Image: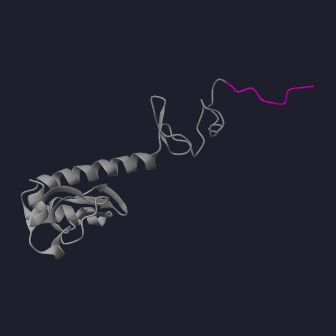
Amino acid sequence: MRNLRRKKSPERGTGAAPDASDPVEGTAPDVDAELGTDMTAVTNDIVINPLDRALAERATLIQLCMYAMDRARSAGVVARLSEGLRGIGVSALQPDGTRFDPAHHEAGGTTPTDNPALHGMIAETEVLGFADRDRVLRAPVVTVYQLRAQCNTFR
């Protein structure tokens, strides 16, 4: 039986488009030289999904903004950082006046009170907490009211 396939000539001067299945002569339309067929970056045999990369970069930027808010001395800077974080779903947690819950708050200290209604309530937030939508990134560090009579028994 005769081979019906034409042999490729060493010169391609015919003006014909390169064969898409030939890796030397051309590439398929959905393949990029730096990206794989599924649009994942290939670097030194490590495949990086663009979504994973974007999520990792977002998390890094959120951490950087939290760091900046902790150190900001200007109310305007804090307000601008808070506004920017809120725009991407990250909110500052400042639970002043709510009941202390060790599952959601970290106690940084206590302050004495004579009012039994304030016992166990959060007096102030020492360090802001942050949540990315429903996921807590950092619990707020708070000062909790404690009845004066109970404060004296622990000293």
In terms of depth relative to the viewer, which is nearer, 126 or 63?
Answer: 126
Q: Is residue 69 magenta?
A: no
Q: Is residue 115 above or below residue 33?
A: below
- Dominant SS in magenta: loop
In the image, which residues are magenta?
A: 1-9
Q: Is residue 83 above or below residue 72?
A: below
Left/right of residue 21 with respect to residue 6 in the rendered view: left
In terms of depth relative to the viewer, which is nearer, 30 or 71?
Answer: 71
Left/right of residue 41 with respect to residue 142 in the rendered view: right
Identified at 21% across, 54% down, the residue is: 66
Q: Is residue 2 magenta?
A: yes
Left/right of residue 131 with respect to residue 48 in the rendered view: left
Residue 21 percent location from the top left of the image: 66, 37
Residue most extreme to the front: 153
> Residue 154 appears in which quarter of the rendering?
bottom left
Residue 46 percent location from the top left of the image: 47, 33
Identified at 39% across, 49% down, the residue is: 54
Residue most extreme to the right: 1
Residue 99 percent location from the top left of the image: 24, 69
Residue 20 percent location from the top left of the image: 64, 39
In terms of depth relative to the viewer, which is nearer, 84 or 137?
Answer: 137
